[in-house]
Amino acid sequence: MTQHNDQQAQRKAAMAVLAHAEAGEIAARLRNLSLPDHHDLRSPENGLVMLRGRVGGDGAPFNLGEATVSRAAVRLASGEVGFGYTLGRDGEKARLIALCDALVQSRDFGGAVERDVIAPLREQLMVRRKQAAAAAAATKVDFYTMVRGEG
Amino acid sequence: MYVAVKGGERAIENAHRLLAHKRRGDQSVAEITLEQISEQLGLAVDRVMSEGSLYDRELASLAIKQARGDLIEAIFLVRAFRATLPRLGASEPVDTGTMRVQRRVSATFKDIPGGQILGPTFDYTHRLLDPSLAQGFVPERPAAAEASTAPTPRVTDILGRDGLIESSPEAEDGASVGDLTREPLNFPADRDLRLQNLARGDEGFLLAMGYSTQRGYGRNHPFVGEIRFGEVEVEFVAEDVGFAVPLGAIELTECQMVNQFKGSATEAPCFTRGYGLAFGQSERKTMSMALVDRALRARELGEEALAPAQDEEFVMSHSDNVQATGFVEHLKLPHYVDFQSELGLLRKLRQEFADANAPDAMKEAAE
């Protein structure tokens, strides 16, 4: 059970990185691996997901508006099934995420895909986030009190 | 008649051909790209996504290009596009408390945990036209500073700890989330439906409604508890995967409006809340939405509802600019048959009027 949860957490963490990358970036990283045989279990398809917010930020949910989403599923020759979901309409990106998700679950490829694909993309994502955070931080207001004059 | 229809078809075809030509404008001027629209007219894209009710920057940019910059026409195009894709489901509700904040200000507290972060804002600019932007402007790189890793709690959460503000309504067990794109609107409408309606409502309409509450038509006594803008992660429970799958991030603006008190014999007085949330950086929209959300709670809070902004049927029935423009603009389409019958009626009435007012001599002569 714990092993199952560990793997689920690992898959989710990989997806959280991949969803932020461009299809071209994922494909370029995957070219460093000698990939096992695989085929599309579900060809990429586009759809809509209704995005929800919460009343007051933390209350009951409400429907805010939809977003385009692309999804795909890939099966490795060794049997692992991977799923790819991403905002937007880039079916190739969804397929690449699905392939990575299948590889993450594979005993033979899990380590390599983490090392050569996910980790560098995570690094790149963190750099981008850090830059955005630093630019925002520079606009933080430093309040100071004017020194009052005597009398 | 058949002949008239043929003539109309050719005229329509040529009108659309002329439109395409006008849309492109002077062809010696470079064509605008979707990337240029998305990157350089970002707030127009945000508005089209919000009111088109579809988060997709590329589609919104295409719609703006196709609509020649007419944002309501672009919103119309985006709404129509939605109908071409299947709905896969609904996301997990986003958590704005974990937003990667690009901007976050409070007008109620100076020293909020995480600080006041101005971000990219028009506030405090002098609103003078800048000729240097006309061509070839290269901005300085943004300044950078050490970012705090401390959390940025919502200001309303801080007020809530001391019970000074009402808490957000919890979801009732097993209650489904209302969706006005699936079921027709009925009144009275619950807050989930009202917020969905306002989130896709016309910014100008909501601005005017919100403004009216400030001018005394339904008093809110509002303060901006907090406005925040930034990225939040979206997750979707995909049944085939079996867990909540990260889909990526969206940009959102949230406004927490803090308003005057409610209280009763059994409940200590506390501030009340109005809420605004929209795609992208949409501050005017979310502030207006929060004002109107609060005004529409008049019935729930036992206030006298006399002003237009407090009338949910009035607000919700007129907030949608696609519906509104459809009904207003259909007036210019051919109404020949309707008009012929009106014309016939008017001629008859005028004849009766003429007969009634004719000099007696004429009447006698006629007889």
Image: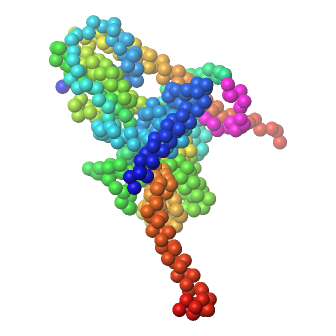
Residue drawn where x is 35% and y is 14% of the image: A27
Identify which residue is drawn at 64% across, 31% down: A142
Q: Position of residue A144 (x, y in %)?
A: 68, 34
Q: Quadrant of residue A71?
A: top left
Reply above or below: B346 against B5. below
> Residue at point 52% right, 59% down?
B309
Left or right, B51 with reference to B222: left
Q: Position of residue A42 (x, y in %)?
A: 23, 26
Instruction: Describe residue A95's horizontal placement relative to residue B231 as left or right.
Output: left
Is B263 rendered above or below residue B136? below
Q: What segment is highlighted magenta in the picture?
A: B119-135
- Camera-nearest residue between B254 and A29: A29
Q: Is residue B234 visible?
A: yes
The magenta stretch spans residue A37: no
Picture quarter with the C terminus of chain A: top right
Q: Is B225 situated left or right of A115 in this image?
A: right
Q: Position of residue B13 (x, y in %)?
A: 46, 41
Majority secondary structure of magenta residues: loop
Name which residue lies at 22% across and 10% down. Answer: A36
Q: Quadrant of residue B265?
A: bottom left
